Image: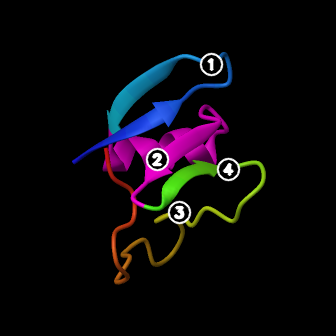
């Protein structure tokens, strides 16, 4: 699935789920879009699928 993102310079793009996790972890995106709206990673607790247990069993909320 492709996710809409906004980079720190204001440009928009579509990225794959797995790439989004890397971009967020490395502070390469400012926002990404979920079904509930835009998530600003500097202001909200955006959960990542990284670390010792990367599998997320919850509902996928990021949409394009």
Label 1–label 4 contact, CB within 8 A: no
- Name the residue beneath numbered marker 2: 33
Where is residue 42 drawn, in percent x and y?
76, 48
Residue at the (34%, 30%) spot, across then down: 14
Q: Which residues are magenta?
A: 16-35
| First in residue order: circle 3 vs circle 2 | 2
Q: Which mark is residue 48?
A: 3
Query: Quarter of the image holding residue 3?
Result: top left
Q: Which mark is residue 53?
A: none
Residue 61 lies in the magenta stretch: no
**Alpha carbon of mark 1 to alpha carbon of mark 4: how far?**
14 Å
Query: Quarter of the image holding residue 9?
Result: top right
Q: Secondary structure at mark 4?
A: loop
Label 3–label 2 contact, CB within 8 A: no
Q: Which mark is residue 41?
A: 4
Q: Secondary structure at mark 2?
A: strand
Residue 22 lies in the magenta stretch: yes
- Asked if 21 appears above or below 58 in the picture, the reply is above
Query: Please, which residue is most extreme toward the right here?
Result: 43
Query: Please, which residue is most extreme toward the bottom here?
Result: 57
């Amino acid at each position: 699935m492709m996710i809409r993102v906004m980079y720190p310079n204001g440009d928009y793009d579509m990225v794959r789920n797995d790439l989004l996790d890397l971009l967020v972890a490395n502070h390469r995106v400012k926002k990404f879009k979920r079904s509930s709206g835009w998530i600003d990673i500097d202001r909200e607790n955006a959960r990542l699928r990284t670390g010792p247990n990367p599998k997320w069993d919850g509902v996928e909320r990021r949409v394009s």
